[in-house]
Image: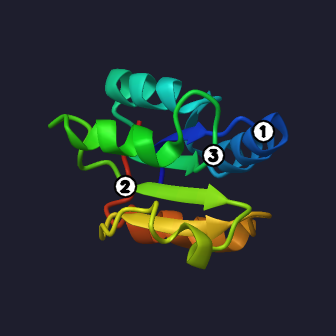
């Protein structure tokens, strides 16, 4: 499975870790550091999947997700949201959408990869 994955998080330690991990799995990775960049790069590159922090400068990940839902080219992109806060605390902020998932930080890479495989049943693309 090879996919183009957009990572949006303001913590460079997390983006670096996820970039290295996903690249080692053969994925193409785009990294951005805020919600505005997330929406812009998603529209520009149309990734197969987005992994987004909820709380970022500029625009939260869930706000950027709402922007993506308004465009035909980006509204079908699955999103894995991340946060240090629990799902219970964030339930009102997260969309009730079958193409979204939530993972709590610190992120377990095996759990994250299982979610990626679940959201990319067709395997992304092969270059």
Q: Picture coordinates of residue 84 (x, y %)?
A: 74, 62
Mark 1 sits on what residue?
A: 11
Judge by depth and name the residue closer to the eye, 25 or 43. 43
Judge by depth and name the residue closer to the eye, 80 or 29. 80
**From what the image shows, is residue 62 above or below residue 119?**
above
First reached walking from the N terminus: tag 1 or tag 3: 1
Left/right placement of residue 109 relative to residue 57 reads right
As drawn, which residue projects farthest toward the left?
A: 72
Looking at the image, do the residues carrying marks 1 and 3 touch, with CB atoms under 8 Å apart? no
Residue 45 seen anywhere in this rendered image of the structure:
yes
Q: CA distance from mark 3 to mark 2?
A: 18 Å
Q: Which mark is residue 55?
A: 3
First reached walking from the N terminus: tag 3 or tag 2: 3
User: Which of the two discs, 1 and 3, sits closer to the camera?
Assistant: 3
> Which residue is pictured at 43% across the width and 54% down the height?
79
Q: Which mark is residue 78?
A: 2
User: Which of the two discs, 2 and 1, sits closer to the camera?
Assistant: 1
User: Which of the two discs, 3 and 2, sits closer to the camera?
Assistant: 3
Q: Mark 3 falls on what kind of element? A: loop
> Which residue is pictured at 78% across the width and 38% down the height?
11
> Which residue is pictured at 75% across the width and 63% down the height?
105
Circle 1 packing at 10 Å, graded few (<14), some (14-19), many (20+), is few
Looking at the image, do the residues carrying marks 2 and 1 touch, with CB atoms under 8 Å apart? no
Q: Picture coordinates of residue 3 (x, y %)?
A: 46, 46
First reached walking from the N terminus: tag 2 or tag 1: 1
Circle 2 packing at 10 Å, graded few (<14), some (14-19), many (20+), is many
Q: Mark 1 falls on what kind of element? A: loop
Q: CA distance from mark 2 to mark 1?
A: 21 Å
**From what the image shows, is residue 13 above or below residue 116?**
above
């Amino acid at each position: 499975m090879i996919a183009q994955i957009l990572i949006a998080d303001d913590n460079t330690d997390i983006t670096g870790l996820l970039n290295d991990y996903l690249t080692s799995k053969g994925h193409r990775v785009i990294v951005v550091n805020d919600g505005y960049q997330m929406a812009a790069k998603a529209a520009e590159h149309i990734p197969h999947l987005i992994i987004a922090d909820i709380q970022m400068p500029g625009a939260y990940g869930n706000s950027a997700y709402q922007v993506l839902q308004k465009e035909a080219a980006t509204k079908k992109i699955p999103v894995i949201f991340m946060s240090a806060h629990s799902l219970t605390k964030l339930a009102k902020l997260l969309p009730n959408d079958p193409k979204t998932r939530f993972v709590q930080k610190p992120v377990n890479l095996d759990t994250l990869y299982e979610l990626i495989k679940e959201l990319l049943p067709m395997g992304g693309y092969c270059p």
